[in-house]
Image (cartoon, rainbow, N blue to C red):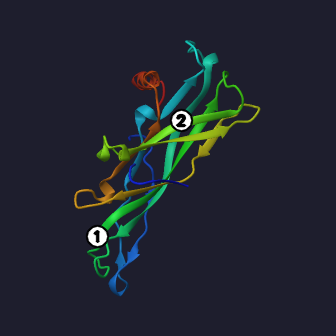
Amino acid sequence: MTRVRFLIVAAVGLAALTGCSDTGLFGSKIVPPSCPTASILEDANRITVYREGPGRDIADIVYEARLIGVEGDCSYEVDKKGKTTVETTYKAVKLGLRPRFIITPGPALSGFKMTVNYFVAMPEFYPSPEGRADFSRTVETSAARTQVDVTDTNIEIRVPLNEKRRGESVQIFVGFVLTDEQLRENRSRTSGRLFR
């Protein structure tokens, strides 16, 4: 399990995050705010990795990968300055995120292992380093070079809250770590409607 102190991601595939409720004074039910929005950044939702060299044909592809979803859940930390009541305030929200990938081996793959690099970022904290963290996931394909559908291990994130930063307003984005060339390719595909 990976822990990130506080950060967290746009516009494709809204993640369904589930929360929980607390019990307040005299057993009354306290319903916490909704979970933050965790989404996939559209320009960084896929990556094509080529072998070294100038070749950019199909035969030069090592692998292609797509981010297809972000599973998750959240819970709120109560700011306990006395007894819990319906006016309960929350000092932080804890999230567990599990990005899901589909990785397709290409003709230029040597061996069976493929490593994807992705980030989790929260724009509100930009440009602070605490607003982004990068992760790697290595997967292994079969001898038949079949497509791999994998959900990464849980990433734990704690976001401090205050009067201006409320849990339901926090935006979190997930995407692949791309080179300038890969980013241009993604944007050209999007504008050309080669994929959705």
What residue is shown with label 1?
Answer: 89
Q: Is residue 5 above or below residue 91?
A: above
Of residues 193 and 38, which is closer to you in this image? 38
Residue 50 position in % (x across, y down) = 58, 21
Q: Position of residue 180 (x, y in %)?
A: 42, 23
Q: Residues within 10 Å of mark 2 (few under 14, many from 20)?
A: some
The answer to which image quadrant residue 154 occupies is bottom right
Going 32% across and 65% down the picture, which residue do you hit? 91
The first of marks 1 and 2 along the sequence is 2
Q: Position of residue 132 (x, y in %)?
A: 40, 43
Q: Is residue 41 above or below residue 27?
A: above
The image quadrant where one finds the N terminus is: bottom right
- Whether pointer 1 and pointer 2 mark residues with C-beta atoms closer than 8 Å, the reply is no
- For the point 66% across and 35% down, the residue is 147
Q: Which residue is mark 2?
A: 66
Residue type, numbered disc 2: Arg
Of 147 and 156, the residue lying toward us: 156
Q: Nearer the viewer, mark 1 or mark 2?
A: 1
Q: Secondary structure at mark 1?
A: loop
At a point 38% along the width and 40% down the height, the residue shown is 11
x and y, in percent, of residue 156 in the image = 48, 56
SS label for mark 2: strand
- Visible residue check, residue 9: no
| Residue 61, quarter of picture | top right
Report how far apart the C-alphas of labels 1 and 2 lie in the structure: 38 Å
Amino acid on which disc 1 is placed: Thr
Q: Is residue 157 above or below residue 51?
A: below
- Residue at the extreme left of the image, as rendered: 163
